[in-house]
C-alpha cells in the first residue's frame, strides 16, 4: 500500500531543485528536534515532529507531527505573527569552516558580508531584542534552499508573540519557552560537534 502525503501541504517540502539531494537531507535532519516548524495554512507551530524522506516520492521531505503529542502543537498562530528574517543557517563547509553559521544572502543570491558562528550570532540577536518581542526562530516550507547549486542553507522565520491576538499570555510564554529550549538544544549539539 502506497503511503499518502500529508493533507497539510506545508508539511511536504520539495527537494527537486537540489543538485545534491543527500547533502540537503543530511543538513535538514539536524533541525528535526531542535527547531519548531510553522504551518501557515492551519496556523500551527509544531514542536514535536519527525522528518521522513519516503521512497514512494523521490525528492520529498515529509514532516509528521507526533499524533500522540497534541500538547506539543500551538494553535492560532496567525500568518501576521510569523515573519521572514532574511537570516540563513549555512553549513560551515560552505565557508571552509566547521559547524553552523548565521549569514545573510543578498538579492543576487550571493553570500552576504558577515558570517557569524550560529550560536554567537543568535545569542547576540536575542540579547538585543526587547523582552516583549523576542527572537523566536522557526522553520516553514520553502526555508530549505540551495545555494550556489550545491549547498543547502536554511532560511529562518520568527514568531512575534505579541502580534498573536488569539493567544493567552500563558500560551505566548509557553511558545517562547519551547522555541528557546529547542534552540538551546541546537547550540548544545553544535558544541558537541565542534569539540569532537
Image: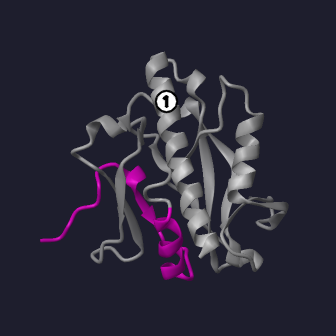
Q: Residue at x 56, y 27 (%)?
A: 161
Name the foreground residue: 38 vs 89. 89
Residue 93: which quarter of the image?
bottom right
- Quarter of the picture holding the C terminus: bottom right
Residue 122 percent coordinates (x, y): 70, 48
State whether residue 57 is above or below residue 113. below
Q: Secondary structure at mark 1?
A: loop
Residue 19: which quarter of the image?
bottom right
State whether residue 134 is above or below residue 65. above
State whether residue 44 is above or below residue 117. above
Residue 183 percent coordinates (x, y): 55, 49
Residue 134: which quarter of the image?
top right
State whether residue 140 is above or below residue 169. below
Q: Is residue 132 left or right of residue 82?
A: right
Q: Residue at x 55, y 76 (%)?
A: 18
- Quarter of the picture holding the N terminus: bottom left
Q: How is the image coloured?
A: one colour
Q: Which residues are magenta?
A: 1-30
Residue 45 percent coordinates (x, y): 43, 40
The answer to whether one can see residue 130 in this image is yes
Residue lying furthest left in this view?
Answer: 1
Q: Is residue 160 located in the magenta-colored stretch of the structure?
A: no
Q: Is residue 19 located in the magenta-colored stretch of the structure?
A: yes
Residue 192 percent coordinates (x, y): 57, 67
Q: Is residue 8 left or right of residue 20?
A: left
Amino acid at each position: 500500500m502506497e503511503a499518502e502525503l500529508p493533507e497539510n501541504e506545508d508539511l511536504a517540502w520539495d527537494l527537486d531543485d537540489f543538485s545534491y539531494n543527500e547533502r540537503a537531507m543530511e543538513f535538514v535532519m539536524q533541525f528535526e528536534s531542535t527547531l519548531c516548524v510553522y504551518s501557515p495554512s492551519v496556523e500551527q507551530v509544531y514542536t514535536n515532529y519527525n522528518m521522513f524522506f519516503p521512497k514512494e516520492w523521490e525528492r520529498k521531505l515529509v514532516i509528521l507531527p507526533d499524533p500522540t503529542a497534541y500538547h506539543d502543537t500551538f494553535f492560532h498562530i496567525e500568518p501576521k505573527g510569523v515573519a521572514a528574517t532574511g537570516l540563513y543557517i549555512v553549513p560551515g563547509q560552505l565557508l571552509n569552516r566547521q559547524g553552523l553559521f548565521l549569514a545573510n544572502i543578498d538579492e543576487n543570491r550571493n553570500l552576504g558580508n558577515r558570517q557569524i558562528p550560529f550560536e554567537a550570532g543568535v545569542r547576540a540577536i536575542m540579547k538585543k531584542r526587547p523582552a516583549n518581542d523576542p527572537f523566536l526562530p522557526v522553520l516553514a516550507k520553502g526555508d530549505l534552499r540551495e545555494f550556489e547549486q550545491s549547498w543547502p542553507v536554511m532560511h529562518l522565520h520568527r514568531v512575534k508573540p505579541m502580534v498573536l491576538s488569539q493567544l493567552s499570555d500563558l500560551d505566548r510564554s509557553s511558545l517562547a519557552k519551547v522555541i528557546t529550549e529547542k534552540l538551546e538544544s541546537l547550540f548544545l549539539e553544535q558544541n558537541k560537534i565542534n569539540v569532537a
